[in-house]
Image (tube, helix red, strand yellow):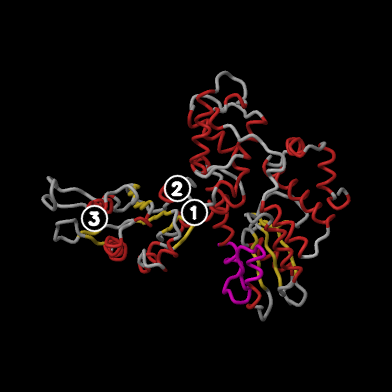
Protein backbone atom coordinates (compact mmCIF):
# COMPACT_ATOMS: atom_id res chain seq x y z
CA UNK A 1 0.00 0.00 0.00
CA UNK A 2 1.06 3.57 -0.66
CA UNK A 3 0.14 6.84 1.01
CA UNK A 4 1.47 10.37 1.22
CA UNK A 5 2.26 11.86 4.61
CA UNK A 6 1.56 15.37 5.86
CA UNK A 7 2.53 16.63 9.33
CA UNK A 8 0.73 19.58 10.91
CA UNK A 9 1.95 19.01 14.43
CA UNK A 10 3.31 21.69 16.74
CA UNK A 11 2.97 20.42 20.28
CA UNK A 12 3.03 16.64 19.97
CA UNK A 13 5.92 14.69 21.44
CA UNK A 14 5.61 12.04 18.72
CA UNK A 15 8.51 12.12 16.31
CA UNK A 16 7.62 12.15 12.60
CA UNK A 17 10.48 9.79 11.80
CA UNK A 18 9.12 7.35 14.38
CA UNK A 19 5.64 7.63 12.82
CA UNK A 20 7.00 7.09 9.31
CA UNK A 21 9.01 4.07 10.44
CA UNK A 22 5.94 2.55 12.16
CA UNK A 23 3.91 2.89 8.99
CA UNK A 24 6.67 1.46 6.83
CA UNK A 25 6.98 -1.55 9.12
CA UNK A 26 3.22 -2.04 8.81
CA UNK A 27 3.52 -2.26 5.02
CA UNK A 28 2.62 1.32 4.06
CA UNK A 29 4.99 2.88 1.54
CA UNK A 30 5.16 6.59 2.30
CA UNK A 31 6.20 9.49 0.11
CA UNK A 32 6.68 13.22 0.56
CA UNK A 33 3.74 15.39 -0.58
CA UNK A 34 5.71 16.97 -3.42
CA UNK A 35 6.49 13.66 -5.14
CA UNK A 36 4.38 11.68 -7.60
CA UNK A 37 0.93 13.17 -8.08
CA UNK A 38 -0.69 9.78 -8.63
CA UNK A 39 -4.00 9.31 -6.82
CA UNK A 40 -3.44 7.72 -3.43
CA UNK A 41 -4.60 8.23 0.16
CA UNK A 42 -3.34 11.23 2.09
CA UNK A 43 -2.41 10.84 5.77
CA UNK A 44 -2.46 14.01 7.87
CA UNK A 45 -0.97 13.87 11.36
CA UNK A 46 -2.23 16.81 13.44
CA UNK A 47 -2.53 17.99 17.02
CA UNK A 48 -4.68 21.11 16.57
CA UNK A 49 -7.80 21.67 14.49
CA UNK A 50 -7.19 25.13 13.04
CA UNK A 51 -7.67 26.99 9.78
CA UNK A 52 -4.46 25.61 8.29
CA UNK A 53 -5.54 22.01 8.93
CA UNK A 54 -9.02 22.58 7.53
CA UNK A 55 -7.61 24.20 4.40
CA UNK A 56 -5.12 21.35 3.97
CA UNK A 57 -7.87 18.73 4.27
CA UNK A 58 -10.02 20.63 1.77
CA UNK A 59 -7.16 20.93 -0.72
CA UNK A 60 -6.09 17.30 -0.46
CA UNK A 61 -9.65 16.00 -0.82
CA UNK A 62 -9.89 18.00 -4.04
CA UNK A 63 -13.31 17.54 -5.58
CA UNK A 64 -14.34 15.20 -2.79
CA UNK A 65 -12.96 11.98 -4.23
CA UNK A 66 -9.50 12.31 -2.67
CA UNK A 67 -8.99 9.97 0.31
CA UNK A 68 -7.88 11.89 3.40
CA UNK A 69 -7.21 10.05 6.66
CA UNK A 70 -6.61 12.43 9.57
CA UNK A 71 -4.71 11.10 12.60
CA UNK A 72 -4.87 13.09 15.82
CA UNK A 73 -1.71 12.87 17.92
CA UNK A 74 -2.91 15.39 20.53
CA UNK A 75 -3.07 14.23 24.12
CA UNK A 76 -6.43 15.99 24.45
CA UNK A 77 -8.27 15.85 21.08
CA UNK A 78 -10.57 18.77 20.22
CA UNK A 79 -13.64 16.60 19.84
CA UNK A 80 -15.91 19.63 19.45
CA UNK A 81 -14.08 20.59 16.22
CA UNK A 82 -13.73 17.20 14.56
CA UNK A 83 -16.97 17.63 12.62
CA UNK A 84 -15.39 20.66 10.96
CA UNK A 85 -12.53 18.44 9.82
CA UNK A 86 -14.92 15.88 8.35
CA UNK A 87 -16.87 18.64 6.57
CA UNK A 88 -13.61 20.06 5.22
CA UNK A 89 -12.86 16.80 3.42
CA UNK A 90 -11.39 14.23 5.82
CA UNK A 91 -12.87 10.80 5.10
CA UNK A 92 -11.90 9.34 8.48
CA UNK A 93 -10.31 10.48 11.75
CA UNK A 94 -8.22 8.27 14.05
CA UNK A 95 -7.05 9.15 17.55
CA UNK A 96 -3.52 7.77 17.81
CA UNK A 97 -3.49 7.48 21.60
CA UNK A 98 -7.00 6.03 21.89
CA UNK A 99 -6.30 3.08 19.60
CA UNK A 100 -4.60 -0.04 21.02
CA UNK A 101 -2.78 -0.44 17.69
CA UNK A 102 -3.01 2.78 15.67
CA UNK A 103 -0.90 1.56 12.75
CA UNK A 104 -3.18 -1.47 12.39
CA UNK A 105 -6.18 0.86 12.40
CA UNK A 106 -4.60 2.94 9.63
CA UNK A 107 -3.73 -0.17 7.60
CA UNK A 108 -7.29 -1.50 7.94
CA UNK A 109 -8.78 1.68 6.53
CA UNK A 110 -6.27 1.91 3.69
CA UNK A 111 -6.91 -1.71 2.77
CA UNK A 112 -10.66 -1.12 2.70
CA UNK A 113 -10.25 1.90 0.45
CA UNK A 114 -7.89 0.00 -1.86
CA UNK A 115 -10.38 -2.86 -2.27
CA UNK A 116 -13.25 -0.46 -2.99
CA UNK A 117 -11.23 1.53 -5.54
CA UNK A 118 -10.09 -1.65 -7.26
CA UNK A 119 -13.75 -2.65 -7.64
CA UNK A 120 -14.64 0.82 -8.94
CA UNK A 121 -12.02 0.40 -11.68
CA UNK A 122 -13.09 -3.15 -12.58
CA UNK A 123 -14.76 -3.84 -15.92
CA UNK A 124 -17.86 -5.31 -14.29
CA UNK A 125 -18.55 -2.08 -12.40
CA UNK A 126 -17.43 0.28 -15.17
CA UNK A 127 -19.76 -1.41 -17.66
CA UNK A 128 -22.70 -1.26 -15.27
CA UNK A 129 -22.38 2.21 -13.77
CA UNK A 130 -20.68 4.55 -16.24
CA UNK A 131 -19.14 7.88 -15.27
CA UNK A 132 -16.24 9.65 -13.58
CA UNK A 133 -17.91 12.78 -12.19
CA UNK A 134 -16.87 13.26 -8.54
CA UNK A 135 -20.44 13.05 -7.21
CA UNK A 136 -21.01 9.84 -9.18
CA UNK A 137 -17.67 8.33 -8.17
CA UNK A 138 -18.46 8.91 -4.50
CA UNK A 139 -21.89 7.35 -4.96
CA UNK A 140 -20.44 4.24 -6.60
CA UNK A 141 -17.82 3.91 -3.87
CA UNK A 142 -20.56 4.06 -1.25
CA UNK A 143 -22.61 1.40 -3.05
CA UNK A 144 -19.62 -0.91 -3.38
CA UNK A 145 -18.66 -0.58 0.26
CA UNK A 146 -22.21 -1.34 1.42
CA UNK A 147 -22.58 -4.23 -1.04
CA UNK A 148 -19.31 -5.99 -0.30
CA UNK A 149 -18.66 -5.27 3.38
CA UNK A 150 -22.17 -5.40 4.84
CA UNK A 151 -25.45 -7.27 4.52
CA UNK A 152 -27.62 -4.31 5.52
CA UNK A 153 -30.85 -3.30 3.83
CA UNK A 154 -30.33 -0.43 1.39
CA UNK A 155 -32.75 2.29 0.31
CA UNK A 156 -31.94 3.87 -3.06
CA UNK A 157 -33.35 7.36 -3.57
CA UNK A 158 -33.36 9.22 -6.86
CA UNK A 159 -35.39 10.66 -9.67
CA UNK A 160 -36.84 8.41 -12.33
CA UNK A 161 -34.17 7.22 -14.75
CA UNK A 162 -31.14 7.73 -12.49
CA UNK A 163 -30.21 4.02 -12.54
CA UNK A 164 -31.67 2.67 -9.31
CA UNK A 165 -32.21 -0.86 -10.65
CA UNK A 166 -28.67 -0.97 -12.06
CA UNK A 167 -27.40 0.12 -8.66
CA UNK A 168 -29.42 -2.65 -7.01
CA UNK A 169 -27.98 -5.21 -9.43
CA UNK A 170 -24.49 -3.96 -8.58
CA UNK A 171 -25.21 -4.50 -4.87
CA UNK A 172 -26.31 -8.06 -5.62
CA UNK A 173 -23.33 -8.84 -7.86
CA UNK A 174 -20.81 -7.62 -5.27
CA UNK A 175 -22.53 -9.19 -2.28
CA UNK A 176 -19.91 -11.41 -0.63
CA UNK A 177 -22.24 -14.24 0.47
CA UNK A 178 -20.64 -17.54 -0.63
CA UNK A 179 -23.88 -19.28 -1.73
CA UNK A 180 -25.79 -16.36 -3.15
CA UNK A 181 -29.06 -17.12 -4.94
CA UNK A 182 -31.19 -15.05 -7.33
CA UNK A 183 -31.82 -11.33 -7.83
CA UNK A 184 -35.60 -10.89 -7.74
CA UNK A 185 -37.38 -7.70 -8.84
CA UNK A 186 -40.80 -6.60 -7.62
CA UNK A 187 -42.14 -3.27 -8.92
CA UNK A 188 -44.81 -1.89 -6.59
CA UNK A 189 -45.96 0.60 -9.25
CA UNK A 190 -47.08 -2.16 -11.64
CA UNK A 191 -48.73 -4.75 -9.39
CA UNK A 192 -52.51 -4.83 -8.89
CA UNK A 193 -53.26 -3.83 -5.26
CA UNK A 194 -55.64 -6.76 -4.80
CA UNK A 195 -52.89 -9.18 -5.81
CA UNK A 196 -49.98 -7.47 -4.08
CA UNK A 197 -50.02 -9.96 -1.20
CA UNK A 198 -49.68 -12.83 -3.64
CA UNK A 199 -46.88 -11.05 -5.49
CA UNK A 200 -44.88 -10.72 -2.27
CA UNK A 201 -45.78 -13.88 -0.37
CA UNK A 202 -47.26 -16.25 -2.96
CA UNK A 203 -50.57 -18.05 -2.52
CA UNK A 204 -52.00 -21.50 -1.97
CA UNK A 205 -54.31 -23.22 -4.39
CA UNK A 206 -57.88 -21.95 -3.94
CA UNK A 207 -56.81 -18.91 -1.93
CA UNK A 208 -58.98 -16.72 -4.17
CA UNK A 209 -60.86 -16.88 -7.45
CA UNK A 210 -58.69 -18.20 -10.28
CA UNK A 211 -55.99 -19.40 -7.86
CA UNK A 212 -55.94 -22.78 -9.60
CA UNK A 213 -52.55 -23.77 -8.26
CA UNK A 214 -50.06 -22.73 -5.61
CA UNK A 215 -47.61 -20.00 -6.52
CA UNK A 216 -44.30 -18.80 -5.09
CA UNK A 217 -44.00 -15.13 -4.21
CA UNK A 218 -41.04 -12.77 -4.60
CA UNK A 219 -39.85 -13.33 -1.04
CA UNK A 220 -39.73 -17.09 -1.50
CA UNK A 221 -37.93 -16.73 -4.82
CA UNK A 222 -35.38 -14.39 -3.22
CA UNK A 223 -34.42 -16.82 -0.46
CA UNK A 224 -30.62 -16.63 -0.04
CA UNK A 225 -30.57 -13.95 -2.71
CA UNK A 226 -31.57 -10.30 -3.09
CA UNK A 227 -35.09 -8.89 -3.18
CA UNK A 228 -35.28 -5.59 -5.03
CA UNK A 229 -38.50 -3.73 -4.24
CA UNK A 230 -38.81 -0.92 -6.78
CA UNK A 231 -41.03 2.11 -6.12
CA UNK A 232 -41.54 0.95 -2.54
CA UNK A 233 -43.31 4.24 -1.83
CA UNK A 234 -46.29 2.90 -3.81
CA UNK A 235 -46.71 -0.07 -1.45
CA UNK A 236 -50.28 -0.17 -0.04
CA UNK A 237 -50.41 0.71 3.66
CA UNK A 238 -52.22 -2.54 4.47
CA UNK A 239 -49.33 -4.56 3.03
CA UNK A 240 -46.60 -2.55 4.75
CA UNK A 241 -47.14 -4.31 8.10
CA UNK A 242 -46.86 -7.72 6.44
CA UNK A 243 -43.63 -6.76 4.71
CA UNK A 244 -42.31 -5.42 8.02
CA UNK A 245 -42.80 -8.84 9.66
CA UNK A 246 -41.12 -10.59 6.74
CA UNK A 247 -38.15 -8.22 6.96
CA UNK A 248 -37.84 -8.43 10.76
CA UNK A 249 -38.59 -12.10 11.34
CA UNK A 250 -37.56 -13.50 7.95
CA UNK A 251 -40.85 -15.45 8.04
CA UNK A 252 -44.13 -15.19 6.13
CA UNK A 253 -47.31 -17.03 5.14
CA UNK A 254 -48.60 -17.53 1.65
CA UNK A 255 -52.00 -15.98 0.96
CA UNK A 256 -54.58 -18.56 2.00
CA UNK A 257 -51.97 -20.62 3.87
CA UNK A 258 -51.44 -21.47 7.53
CA UNK A 259 -47.79 -22.52 7.46
CA UNK A 260 -45.06 -20.09 8.44
CA UNK A 261 -42.22 -20.23 5.95
CA UNK A 262 -38.74 -18.79 6.30
CA UNK A 263 -36.70 -16.84 3.79
CA UNK A 264 -33.30 -15.22 4.25
CA UNK A 265 -32.78 -12.43 1.74
CA UNK A 266 -31.05 -9.12 1.34
CA UNK A 267 -33.49 -6.27 0.84
CA UNK A 268 -32.82 -3.38 -1.53
CA UNK A 269 -35.62 -0.85 -2.01
CA UNK A 270 -35.88 2.12 -4.35
CA UNK A 271 -38.19 5.08 -4.77
CA UNK A 272 -38.33 8.46 -6.47
CA UNK A 273 -40.34 9.83 -3.54
CA UNK A 274 -39.12 11.34 -0.28
CA UNK A 275 -40.21 8.53 2.02
CA UNK A 276 -39.32 10.50 5.14
CA UNK A 277 -41.96 13.05 4.13
CA UNK A 278 -44.47 10.24 3.54
CA UNK A 279 -43.73 8.96 7.04
CA UNK A 280 -44.52 12.39 8.48
CA UNK A 281 -47.81 12.48 6.58
CA UNK A 282 -48.75 8.97 7.68
CA UNK A 283 -48.54 7.48 4.19
CA UNK A 284 -45.68 5.15 5.06
CA UNK A 285 -45.05 3.23 8.27
CA UNK A 286 -42.22 4.68 10.29
CA UNK A 287 -41.09 1.29 11.60
CA UNK A 288 -40.91 -0.13 8.08
CA UNK A 289 -39.03 2.94 6.88
CA UNK A 290 -36.33 2.46 9.52
CA UNK A 291 -36.05 -1.22 8.58
CA UNK A 292 -35.56 -0.65 4.86
CA UNK A 293 -33.42 2.47 5.28
CA UNK A 294 -30.60 0.95 7.32
CA UNK A 295 -28.34 2.52 4.70
CA UNK A 296 -29.52 5.22 2.30
CA UNK A 297 -27.85 6.05 -1.00
CA UNK A 298 -29.09 8.95 -3.11
CA UNK A 299 -28.39 8.66 -6.86
CA UNK A 300 -27.69 12.08 -8.43
CA UNK A 301 -29.71 13.33 -11.42
CA UNK A 302 -27.90 13.60 -14.74
CA UNK A 303 -27.93 17.42 -14.57
CA UNK A 304 -25.59 17.20 -11.57
CA UNK A 305 -22.99 15.17 -13.48
CA UNK A 306 -23.13 16.52 -17.00
CA UNK A 307 -19.48 15.76 -17.74
CA UNK A 308 -20.43 12.06 -17.81
CA UNK A 309 -22.81 12.57 -20.75
CA UNK A 310 -20.26 11.92 -23.57
CA UNK A 311 -19.02 8.74 -21.87
CA UNK A 312 -22.60 7.57 -21.31
CA UNK A 313 -23.46 8.28 -24.96
CA UNK A 314 -20.48 6.20 -26.14
CA UNK A 315 -21.49 3.43 -23.74
CA UNK A 316 -25.04 3.33 -25.10
CA UNK A 317 -23.69 3.21 -28.66
CA UNK A 318 -21.66 0.12 -27.73
CA UNK A 319 -24.69 -1.49 -26.11
CA UNK A 320 -26.93 -0.75 -29.11
CA UNK A 321 -24.34 -1.98 -31.62
CA UNK A 322 -22.15 -4.46 -29.73
CA UNK A 323 -20.34 -5.69 -32.83
CA UNK A 324 -19.20 -2.25 -33.96
CA UNK A 325 -16.84 0.35 -32.53
CA UNK A 326 -18.87 3.40 -31.44
CA UNK A 327 -18.44 6.34 -33.84
CA UNK A 328 -16.97 9.59 -32.48
CA UNK A 329 -19.23 12.54 -31.72
CA UNK A 330 -18.96 15.65 -33.86
CA UNK A 331 -18.21 18.65 -31.58
CA UNK A 332 -21.65 20.13 -32.33
CA UNK A 333 -23.36 16.88 -31.35
CA UNK A 334 -21.27 16.74 -28.21
CA UNK A 335 -22.29 20.30 -27.32
CA UNK A 336 -25.92 19.45 -28.07
CA UNK A 337 -25.90 16.44 -25.74
CA UNK A 338 -24.12 18.39 -23.00
CA UNK A 339 -26.52 21.34 -23.13
CA UNK A 340 -29.78 19.41 -23.53
CA UNK A 341 -32.18 18.94 -20.61
CA UNK A 342 -32.91 15.36 -19.47
CA UNK A 343 -36.01 15.21 -17.26
CA UNK A 344 -35.81 11.43 -17.58
CA UNK A 345 -32.12 11.44 -16.64
CA UNK A 346 -29.84 8.62 -17.88
CA UNK A 347 -32.79 6.65 -19.26
CA UNK A 348 -33.77 9.60 -21.45
CA UNK A 349 -30.19 10.06 -22.65
CA UNK A 350 -30.18 6.44 -23.76
CA UNK A 351 -33.39 6.99 -25.72
CA UNK A 352 -31.95 10.09 -27.40
CA UNK A 353 -28.80 8.18 -28.39
CA UNK A 354 -30.94 5.31 -29.70
CA UNK A 355 -32.93 7.69 -31.92
CA UNK A 356 -29.74 9.30 -33.22
CA UNK A 357 -28.19 5.92 -34.02
CA UNK A 358 -31.21 4.87 -36.11
CA UNK A 359 -30.26 7.68 -38.51
CA UNK A 360 -26.48 7.40 -38.41
CA UNK A 361 -24.81 5.41 -41.20
CA UNK A 362 -21.25 4.97 -42.38
CA UNK A 363 -17.90 5.05 -40.61
CA UNK A 364 -17.79 8.82 -39.94
CA UNK A 365 -18.64 10.71 -36.77
CA UNK A 366 -22.17 11.33 -35.53
CA UNK A 367 -23.22 14.76 -36.87
CA UNK A 368 -26.12 17.10 -36.15
CA UNK A 369 -27.80 15.76 -39.28
CA UNK A 370 -28.27 12.49 -37.38
CA UNK A 371 -30.36 14.21 -34.72
CA UNK A 372 -34.10 13.64 -35.44
CA UNK A 373 -36.14 16.79 -35.96
CA UNK A 374 -38.24 16.15 -32.85
CA UNK A 375 -35.03 16.37 -30.80
CA UNK A 376 -33.77 19.63 -32.29
CA UNK A 377 -33.13 22.38 -29.73
CA UNK A 378 -35.54 25.29 -29.68
CA UNK A 379 -34.44 28.32 -31.76
CA UNK A 380 -32.12 30.41 -29.65
CA UNK A 381 -33.30 33.82 -28.51
CA UNK A 382 -30.71 36.47 -27.74
CA UNK A 383 -30.40 36.95 -24.01
CA UNK A 384 -32.66 33.96 -23.20
CA UNK A 385 -29.95 32.38 -21.04
CA UNK A 386 -30.07 35.39 -18.72
CA UNK A 387 -33.05 34.11 -16.76
CA UNK A 388 -34.41 34.85 -13.29
CA UNK A 389 -31.70 32.70 -11.68
CA UNK A 390 -29.00 34.80 -13.33
CA UNK A 391 -30.62 38.02 -12.15
CA UNK A 392 -31.03 36.69 -8.61
CA UNK A 393 -27.35 35.69 -8.46
CA UNK A 394 -26.31 39.21 -9.51
CA UNK A 395 -28.68 40.75 -6.95
CA UNK A 396 -27.25 38.57 -4.17
CA UNK A 397 -23.71 39.58 -5.13
CA UNK A 398 -24.56 43.31 -5.18
CA UNK A 399 -26.44 43.12 -1.88
CA UNK A 400 -23.36 41.47 -0.36
CA UNK A 401 -21.17 44.36 -1.49
CA UNK A 402 -19.45 42.54 -4.38
CA UNK A 403 -18.22 45.00 -7.02
CA UNK A 404 -18.71 44.80 -10.78
CA UNK A 405 -15.13 43.74 -11.51
CA UNK A 406 -15.33 40.85 -9.02
CA UNK A 407 -18.72 39.74 -10.38
CA UNK A 408 -17.30 39.60 -13.90
CA UNK A 409 -14.20 37.73 -12.76
CA UNK A 410 -16.33 35.19 -10.83
CA UNK A 411 -18.56 34.64 -13.87
CA UNK A 412 -15.48 34.03 -16.05
CA UNK A 413 -13.99 31.62 -13.51
CA UNK A 414 -17.24 29.65 -13.34
CA UNK A 415 -17.58 29.53 -17.15
CA UNK A 416 -13.99 28.28 -17.48
CA UNK A 417 -14.50 25.64 -14.81
CA UNK A 418 -17.70 24.40 -16.47
CA UNK A 419 -16.14 24.27 -19.94
CA UNK A 420 -13.00 22.45 -18.77
CA UNK A 421 -15.03 19.99 -16.70
CA UNK A 422 -17.50 19.29 -19.52
CA UNK A 423 -14.61 18.70 -21.91
CA UNK A 424 -12.94 16.36 -19.39
CA UNK A 425 -9.83 18.53 -19.10
CA UNK A 426 -9.28 19.00 -22.86
CA UNK A 427 -8.20 22.66 -22.99
CA UNK A 428 -8.40 22.93 -26.78
CA UNK A 429 -12.09 21.97 -26.84
CA UNK A 430 -12.79 24.10 -23.76
CA UNK A 431 -11.14 27.12 -25.38
CA UNK A 432 -13.21 26.59 -28.54
CA UNK A 433 -16.42 26.56 -26.50
CA UNK A 434 -15.36 29.70 -24.65
CA UNK A 435 -14.35 31.52 -27.82
CA UNK A 436 -10.76 32.14 -26.72
CA UNK A 437 -7.36 30.88 -27.81
CA UNK A 438 -5.69 27.91 -26.14
CA UNK A 439 -2.93 30.23 -24.92
CA UNK A 440 -5.39 32.69 -23.39
CA UNK A 441 -7.16 29.90 -21.54
CA UNK A 442 -3.88 28.50 -20.21
CA UNK A 443 -2.83 31.94 -18.96
CA UNK A 444 -6.24 32.55 -17.40
CA UNK A 445 -6.12 29.24 -15.53
CA UNK A 446 -2.50 29.74 -14.44
CA UNK A 447 -3.10 33.23 -13.03
CA UNK A 448 -6.82 34.06 -13.00
CA UNK A 449 -6.55 37.43 -11.26
CA UNK A 450 -4.03 38.93 -13.70
CA UNK A 451 -6.18 38.16 -16.77
CA UNK A 452 -9.63 39.66 -16.07
Tags 2 and 3 in contact by the CB under 8 Å rule? no
Left or right: 253 in relation to 284: left
In the rendered image, which quarter is residue 256 located in?
Answer: bottom left
Magenta span contains residue 88: yes
Residue nearest the viewer, comparing 304 with 119: 304
Q: Nearer the viewer, mark 2 or mark 3?
A: 3
Percent coordinates x, y for residue 100 in the rendering: 57, 74
Using the image, tell me which numbered label, if any, was put on residue 412: none
Tags 1 and 2 in contact by the CB under 8 Å rule? yes
* Rendered view: 358 above or below 347: above
Q: Residue furthest bottom?
A: 76
Q: CA distance from mark 3 to mark 1?
A: 30 Å
Residue nearest the viewer, comparing 64 with 34: 64
Residue nearest the viewer, comparing 281 with 121: 281
Q: Between disc 1 and disc 2, whose residue precedes?
A: 1
Residue found 55% across the figure and 26% down from its top: 325
Using the image, tell me which numbered label, if any, was put on residue 197: 3
Percent coordinates x, y for residue 58 in the rendering: 70, 61
Q: Between disc 3 and disc 1, whose residue precedes?
A: 1
Magenta span contains residue 200: no
Quadrant position of the N terminus in the picture: bottom right
Q: Magenta stretch?
A: 83-108
Q: Between disc 2 and disc 3, whose residue precedes?
A: 2
* Rendered view: 271 above or below 277: above
Percent coordinates x, y for residue 219 in the rendering: 28, 54
From the image, tell me which residue sits under label 1: 143
From the image, tell me which residue sits under label 2: 170
Q: Nearer the viewer, mark 3 or mark 1?
A: 3
Q: CA distance from mark 2 to mark 3?
A: 27 Å
Q: Residues within 10 Å of mark 3 (few under 14, many from 20)?
A: many
Amino acid sequence: MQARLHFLTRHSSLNRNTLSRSLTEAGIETQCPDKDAAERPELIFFDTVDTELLEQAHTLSGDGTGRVLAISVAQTPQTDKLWQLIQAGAAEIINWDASPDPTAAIVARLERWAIVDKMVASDSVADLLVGQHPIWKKTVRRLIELAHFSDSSILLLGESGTGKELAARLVHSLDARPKKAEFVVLDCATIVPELSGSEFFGHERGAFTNALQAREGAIELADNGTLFVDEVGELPVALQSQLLRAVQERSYKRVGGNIWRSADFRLVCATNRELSADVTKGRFRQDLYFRIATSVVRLPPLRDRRQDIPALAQHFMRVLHPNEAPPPLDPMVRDYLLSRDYPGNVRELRQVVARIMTRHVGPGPVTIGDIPEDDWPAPSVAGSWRDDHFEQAIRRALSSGVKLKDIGRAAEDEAIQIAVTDEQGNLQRAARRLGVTDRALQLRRANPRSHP
